[in-house]
């Protein structure tokens, strides 16, 4: 019965349960007094004290207030703030997706030329020139495989697509234009890279140097280790030819 009284959720239920307890108590006492009047007192049910009843009422009131607070819907301002935060998160995610993938930027200077490879000296297969669009450029090579290819597959009448690195030789006299040449990497019957003929891809440092009147792009060799030597290519940004 005491548990039934404690389970009351509001004052109405509490009063109803209290009435039921009182009624059952009276009936029980009446029945016990008929059987054994002298021991009727032993079967009395303890009623909760006023102090306990007051404490239970306070606890129930707090519980009801907490439930009402939890079940109370969010205000319009809270909904708007939450919505704005979600929208900002969506925008940030879209911006991150639209950004190009991160990569390690490196120095680069490569391009495609089309022309004939001819020996610089008829009786010497160590030096070659490139004839392209009526102009002659000096060719150098760093790979033994390229040297062997030029020697074995030499054909001065055949046009080829050359993959090359450009290089410029600057002179102390500022009035003397730099000399343009190329380091040959490969020679093919079809373009080897996704570049057009006479198209170059350059990535380097924009700077001024003492031997050139105009700014240049300085392209260094990419370092692979602490002891690697650095070579530089100074490519004019403004060229007359």
Image (cartoon, grey):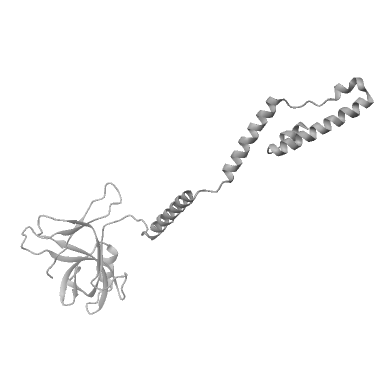
Q: Residue at x 70, y 26 (%)?
A: 50
Work out whether 134 lies above or below 15.
below
Q: Quadrant of residue 58?
A: top right
Work out whether 19 lies above or below 177.
above
In the image: residue 30, left or right of residue 87: right
Residue nearest the observer in this picture, 185 or 63: 63
Residue nearest the observer in this picture, 16 or 130: 16
In the image: residue 10, left or right of residue 93: right
Can you give x and y, in whole percent of width and height, for residue 221 in the image?
25, 55
Can you give x and y, in whole percent of width and height, for residue 190 in the image?
31, 75
Quarter of the figure that contains the C terminus:
bottom left
Residue 121 visible in the picture: no
In the image: residue 105, left or right of residue 72: left
- Residue sticking out furthest to the top: 38
Work out whether 48 lies above or below 68.
above
Quarter of the figure that contains the N terminus:
top right
Can you give x and y, in whole percent of width and height, for residue 36 in the image?
93, 23
Residue 70 visible in the picture: yes
Can you give x and y, in whole percent of width and height, for residue 56 in the image?
67, 31
Q: Quadrant of residue 24?
A: top right
- Residue sticking out furthest to the right: 35
Residue nearest the observer in this picture, 190 or 66: 66
Q: Quadrant of residue 18?
A: top right
């Amino acid at each position: 019965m005491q548990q039934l009284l404690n389970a009351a959720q509001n004052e109405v239920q509490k009063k109803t349960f209290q009435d039921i307890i009182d009624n059952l108590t009276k009936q029980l006492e009446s029945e016990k007094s008929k059987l054994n009047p002298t021991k009727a007192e032993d079967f009395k049910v303890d009623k909760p004290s006023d102090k306990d009843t007051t404490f239970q009422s306070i606890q129930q009131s707090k519980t009801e207030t907490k439930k009402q607070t939890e079940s109370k819907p969010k205000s319009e301002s809270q909904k708007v703030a939450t919505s704005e935060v979600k929208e900002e998160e969506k925008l940030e995610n879209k911006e991150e997706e639209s950004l190009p993938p991160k990569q390690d930027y490196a120095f680069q200077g490569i391009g495609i030329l089309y022309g004939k490879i001819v020996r610089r000296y008829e009786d010497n297969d160590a030096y070659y020139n490139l004839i392209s669009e009526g102009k002659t450029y000096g060719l150098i090579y760093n790979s033994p495989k390229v040297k062997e290819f030029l020697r074995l597959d030499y054909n001065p009448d055949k046009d080829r697509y050359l993959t090359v690195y450009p290089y410029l030789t600057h002179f102390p006299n500022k009035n003397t234009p730099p000399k343009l040449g190329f380091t040959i990497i490969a020679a093919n019957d079809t373009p080897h890279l996704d570049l057009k003929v006479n198209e170059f891809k350059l990535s380097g440092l924009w700077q001024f140097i003492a031997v050139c009147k105009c700014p240049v792009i300085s392209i260094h060799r990419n370092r692979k280790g602490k002891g690697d030597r650095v070579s530089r290519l100074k490519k004019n940004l403004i060229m007359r030819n």
